[in-house]
């Protein structure tokens, strides 16, 4: 019996990872597609007139076991993949894409949905029900339900190709990351590197049976080398290896894949009556139109560029004075920025790391969640996981009710893609008077413990952990009726608010003193270091802002125009970067070919949302600060109006209910030091 075919008979209904064989996935998912088709047929063939309950709700709750099986599979493909899983993903993606089209292009089903939608004003629906009805109707109308038969076939073909291309893009990037290693045999070449980075590189070399030290493109290996290694030639080698991922004209090259994805997205948008892919996407975002996004990005660019250019000039002068560097290159950026930061603030990440032992930071973020939202986290070992590194927690509220199951997966390995993300194995929803609680996961890539040291985080990694945990809270505290409106199922430019707002606590004395204690002595982080963290928080903010804006503008360049005339990925990218470029270009490097956020993940026409959400988060945190960062009153308002509500209402309505006003951009510009304080 294939365990994926029926509800899981486990404690808390968690995924039984150890009982699932890789070969179970494909037959189970194909079988569950057939089961879901029967559920859809039952809705279509219902002799009764279409109602909200027998059509919209029935559709919403269909395919639940399929949803669970696919979420387990694709989460594993990101966090613990192998050749077999990747092969199955390539086989399943077009099948699932075709099945999605079978639903949205089903005429009889659409007629029933449209019938309920057309009579919505005469129905007594709750706000959440109206939102669900609107979302269901749009899932058809925005995905081809109104097309003629020939165009429906074209749409199916485009969607099938896109599903495969996106997977292929990600596989190439992962393979390129795993294929590269820099072996160092001369200890002099390690000059400048912290002891922890050396030890991790030595341990990695030993695990591979190699003499010396091994550095890779995984962030915990790459970032310390680029930040501290004195050997400029080796920094250049590593930087070029990272920047040339999937841009070498070989079997793992993504240039054609980028062009194909951009063109297919454009063709799809045109087929559906939209000017570009960005017009299609942004119709369902707070920003609404590409014009608004571009104006938002360019307005910030205008404010940030003078500051960025000044910072760059100062950095260049500093490097020249220190080492006689006549021209600053990209592989000098982190190295000299760190040196300048140490000089200006006497603040070294290596001095901070002993205060940020991973376990202490985890306990810290849990303590903050308890103070704000009354949550308790209990580590439990009775839950099955997909890898021995994964930690599991039972999350309860003040009345000991189950809130969520939380998975935490913190260390890099060859089957895991780079970066950090939050995901879900089971959504929250209410059915048959039962509030089904969510199963939420955070996946990161932090430095593993070595033989002599625990996992010690850089301050940047601390903010990453808080960021992903903010997403997790959005998932955990969900309290909606329908799964497709629950948790992080919100407008894409609203989804970063809970994650980015939580990062603010990392800079506050009251919060840091809860968890930043020296891993050897137990000493609480000194006030002097807290002040330095605060003082340095806007260090190179102009350059950082410019970098984020450049990514947003590149995204819009790919998706806000007709890409059919583009033949050269690199020169097109260079044109998009023209107004944000500070460093000389590196001809061997290309960002687009490894820009997984927009070509594999869900950020196409949405990368601007990080900056958009920064406006929201700065304004929201300003509200907390006015009442105290642990104000129960403000935290409860944030939970009741933002975290628990998911996508049940327009996000601006939810935000104003929490804040009492629309967000003011001044809070962000002030925090970033781009306005007089």
Image: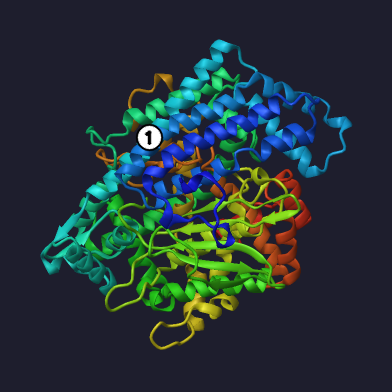
Report whether 284 appears left or right of 15: right
Q: Nearer the viewer, residue 227 or 22?
A: 22
Residue 500 seen in this snapshot: no
Instruction: Determine whether 517 is above or below 314 in the image.
Output: below
Mark 1, residue position? 90
x and y percent of residue 381 in the render? Answer: 48, 70
Report whether 148 appears left or right of 380: right
Instruction: Determine whether 343 is above or below 613 in the image.
Output: below
x and y percent of residue 129 in the render? Answer: 77, 40
Instruction: Determine whether 649 is above or below 618 in the image.
Output: above
> Within 10 Å of the Cα at label 1, are there few (<14), some (14-19), or many (20+) other Cα atoms?
some
Where residue 230 sits, quadrant-wise, is bottom left
Q: Nearer the viewer, residue 595 or 239?
A: 595
| Residue under the image location 73 percent in, 71 percent down | 632
| Residue under the image location 55 percent in, 23 percent down | 269
x and y percent of residue 108 in the render? Answer: 68, 20
Where residue 41 sits, quadrant-wise, is top right
Check disc 1 and report its element: helix, strand or loop: helix
Q: Nearer the viewer, residue 179 or 513?
A: 179
Q: Nearer the viewer, residue 426 or 126?
A: 426
Where residue 404 sits, quadrant-wise, is bottom right
x and y percent of residue 25 in the render? Answer: 43, 42
Query: Which of the image's four quarters has the C terminus?
Result: bottom right
| Residue under the image location 60 percent in, 67 percent down | 395
């Amino acid at each position: 019996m294939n365990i994926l075919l029926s509800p899981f008979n486990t404690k808390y209904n968690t995924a039984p990872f150890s009982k699932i064989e890789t070969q179970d996935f494909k037959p189970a998912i194909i079988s569950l597609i057939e089961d879901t088709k029967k559920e859809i047929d039952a809705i279509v063939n219902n002799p009764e007139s279409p109602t909200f309950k027998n059509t919209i709700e029935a559709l919403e709750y269909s395919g639940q076991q399929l949803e669970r099986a696919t979420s387990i599979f694709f989460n594993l493909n990101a966090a613990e993949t192998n050749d077999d899983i990747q092969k199955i993903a390539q086989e399943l993606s077009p099948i699932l894409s075709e099945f999605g089209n079978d639903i949205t292009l089903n005429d009889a089903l659409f007629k029933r949905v449209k019938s309920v939608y057309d009579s919505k004003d005469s129905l007594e629906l709750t706000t959440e029900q109206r939102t669900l009805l609107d979302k269901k109707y749009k899932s058809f109308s925005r995905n081809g339900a109104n097309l003629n038969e020939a165009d429906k076939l074209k749409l199916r073909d485009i969607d099938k190709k896109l599903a495969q291309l996106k997977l292929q893009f990600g596989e190439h990037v992962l393979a390129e990351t795993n294929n590269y290693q820099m072996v160092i045999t001369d200890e002099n070449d390690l000059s400048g590197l912290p002891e922890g980075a050396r030890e991790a590189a030595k341990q990695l070399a030993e695990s591979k049976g190699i003499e010396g030290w091994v550095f890779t493109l995984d962030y915990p290996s790459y970032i310390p080398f680029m930040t501290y290694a004195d050997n400029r030639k080796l920094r250049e080698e590593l930087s070029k290896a990272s920047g040339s991922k999937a841009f070498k004209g070989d079997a793992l090259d993504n240039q054609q894949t980028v062009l194909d994805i951009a063109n297919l997205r454009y063709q799809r948008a045109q087929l559906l009556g939209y000017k570009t892919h960005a017009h299609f996407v942004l119709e369902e975002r707070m920003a609404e139109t590409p014009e608004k996004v571009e104006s938002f990005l360019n307005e910030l660019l205008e404010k940030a560029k003078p500051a960025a250019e000044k910072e760059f000039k100062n950095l260049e002068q500093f490097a020249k004075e220190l080492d006689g560097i006549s021209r600053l290159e990209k592989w000098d950026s982190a190295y000299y920025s760190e040196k300048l930061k140490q000089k200006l603030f006497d603040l070294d990440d290596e001095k901070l790391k002993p205060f940020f032992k991973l376990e202490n930071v985890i306990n810290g973020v849990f303590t903050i969640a308890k103070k704000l939202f009354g949550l308790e986290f209990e580590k439990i070992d009775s839950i099955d996981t997909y890898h021995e590194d994964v930690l599991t927690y039972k999350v309860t509220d003040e009345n000991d009710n189950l809130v969520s199951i939380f998975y935490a997966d913190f260390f890099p390995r060859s089957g895991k893609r780079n970066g950090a993300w939050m995901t879900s194995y089971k959504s929250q929803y209410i059915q048959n008077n039962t509030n089904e609680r969510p199963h939420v996961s955070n996946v990161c890539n932090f430095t593993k413990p070595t033989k002599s040291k625990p996992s010690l985080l850089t301050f940047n990694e601390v903010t990453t952990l808080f960021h992903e945990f903010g997403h997790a809270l959005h998932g955990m505290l969900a309290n909606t009726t329908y799964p497709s409106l629950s948790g992080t199922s919100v407008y894409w430019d609203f989804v970063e608010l809970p994650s980015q707002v939580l990062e603010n606590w990392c800079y506050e004395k009251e919060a840091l003193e809860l968890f930043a204690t020296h891993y050897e002595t137990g000493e609480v982080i000194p006030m002097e270091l807290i002040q330095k963290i605060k003082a340095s928080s806007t260090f190179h903010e102009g350059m950082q802002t410019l970098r984020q804006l450049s990514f947003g503008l590149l995204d819009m360049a790919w998706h806000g125009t007709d890409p059919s005339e583009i033949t050269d990925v690199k020169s097109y990218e260079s044109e998009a970067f023209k107004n944000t470029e500070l460093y000389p270009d590196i001809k061997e490097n290309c960002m687009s070919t490894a820009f997984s956020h927009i070509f594999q993940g869900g950020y196409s026409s949405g990368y601007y949302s990080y900056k958009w959400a920064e406006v929201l988060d700065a304004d929201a945190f300003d509200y907390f600060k006015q009442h105290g960062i642990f104000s129960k009153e403000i935290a409860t308002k944030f939970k009741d109006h933002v975290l628990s509500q998911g996508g049940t209402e327009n996000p601006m309505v939810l935000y104003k209910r929490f804040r009492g006003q629309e967000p003011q951009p001044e809070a962000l510009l002030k925090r970033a030091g781009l306005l007089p304080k």
